[in-house]
Amino acid sequence: MKILDSIVTQAAGIAAIRRDIHAHPELCFEEVRTADVVAQKLTEWGIPIHRGLGTTGVVGILKNGSSDRAIGLRADMDALPMQEFNTFSHASKHQGKMHACGHDGHTAMLLAAAQHFAKNRNFDGTVYLIFQPAEEGGGGAREMIKEGLFEQFPMQAVFGMHNWPGSQIGKFAVSPGPVMASSNEFKITIRGKGGHAALPHNGVDPVPVACQMVQAFQTIISRNKKPVDAGVISVTMIHAGEATNVIPDSCELQGTVRTFTLEVLDLIEKRMQQVAEHVCAAHDAVCEFEFVRNYPPTINSPKEAEFARKVMASIVGEANVEAQEPTMGAEDFSYMLQAKPGAYCFIANGDGSHREMGHGGGPCMLHNPSYDFNDDLIPLGATYWVRLAEAWFAEQAA
């Protein structure tokens, strides 16, 4: 691996910052302390900053030369509302909050790159360091864009990176096209007519209506969309009734829909509403249908994905840059990729053997209470950020 010596030299200091952030997790739009740490370090290194986009976002501004070309590098900062099982020294100090997705590490890798850039600006243009709040459900990327991220800081491309547990350290993954799914929620209320369970003919029972509806939704996946297109409808909650001898007045279904394209999402939403309303009508029940679109699919632009792959290969070798298997998880970096060309890649986090004594004993997987970011990634991830920016400007100038 061709890791930059200057970054390796400073790695221990950046790892200490990462562990400090891990010990003080903050939820979406509450990343005040984290943003203060980021802003303080960037200012200490002589990097101008802008604060406040998306409430707690921080943008570092690295200018060099005379070119008006610009690139964005993004890291998310927020934690998850869950209890940490780890008991090592940098475990969460706040009940019910944990950095279980590695955003502390994402922030650290971009800070390490910033520290290098502060003294080594081998590019002609501007690098914007985007420290984003509220990826975990808050849509922080969307909010930063709404508040003028790309107007205040015009850039021609934007790149993101996420740690990926289970793969061997020293590997990357990136591919063109959809790499993470859209995230959507639905809530359906079936209004029937309650009554005595011994006299069902006198009422309209919403429970069998709900059962039929859940089964019918799966025919959308198997019979309405193309077999080669991915899509998931999961009914994850069914609520009805309070007593064994009472037919309830209503039944509520909730769940999630995931797709890799907006076209499939449009189809699923339309057909779900049709199925729900007509199944209810067939049983003389009333349907209330709600469908909320959260994050769109994360779609890498082909040119930028291939460019990122070449940069990775120059650092770790071709054999260690893998195809990025799409996942049905969702990511709000998707909003940035809707606005700008770019690519979102994975960097391997290892198998969990890096964790110190006192870890929770569970698997080192994302959103697991025993997870911890692998500090060995910091020099590698930071080197990727630096080489990506340098190569991008060099290609633009060619």
Image (cartoon, helix red, strand yellow):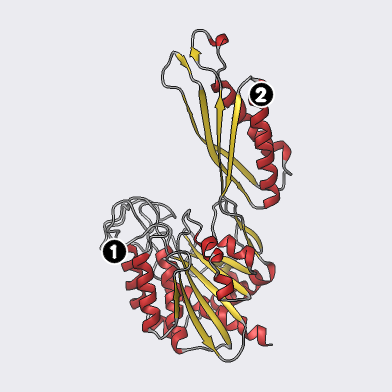
Residue 69 in picture, x, y percent from top left: 62, 82
Identity, as a three-letter code, of the amino acid under mark 2: Ala
Residue 317 shows in this picture: no
Residue 116 in picture, x, y percent from top left: 44, 84
Q: Quadrant of residue 38?
A: bottom left
- Earlier along the polypeptide chain: callout 2 or callout 1? 1
Identity, as a three-letter code, of the amino acid under mark 1: His
Residue 243 in picture, x, y percent from top left: 41, 18
Distance between mark 2 and mark 1 Cα atoms: 56 Å
Q: Name the residue nearer the viewer: 6 or 235.
A: 235
* Residue drawn at 54 percent across, 57 percent down: 331
Q: Which residue is the site of mark 2?
A: 281
Q: Is residue 200 above or below residue 101?
A: above
* Residue furthest out toward the bottom: 65
Q: Name the residue nearer the viewer: 193 or 31.
A: 193
Q: Nearer the viewer, mark 2 or mark 1?
A: 2
Left or right: 27 with respect to 206? Answer: left
Element carrying mark 2: helix
Q: Quadrant of the C terminus?
A: bottom right
Q: Quadrant of residue 345?
A: bottom right
Q: Name the residue nearer the viewer: 47 or 303.
A: 47
Q: Which residue is the site of mark 1?
A: 90
* Residue drawn at 56 percent across, 87 percent down: 123
Q: Quadrant of residue 227?
A: top right
Residue 258 in picture, x, y percent from top left: 60, 47
Q: Residues within 10 Å of mark 1 (few under 14, many from 20)?
A: some
Q: Residues within 10 Å of mark 2 (few under 14, many from 20)?
A: few
Residue 70 shows in this picture: yes
Left or right: 135 with respect to 221? Answer: left
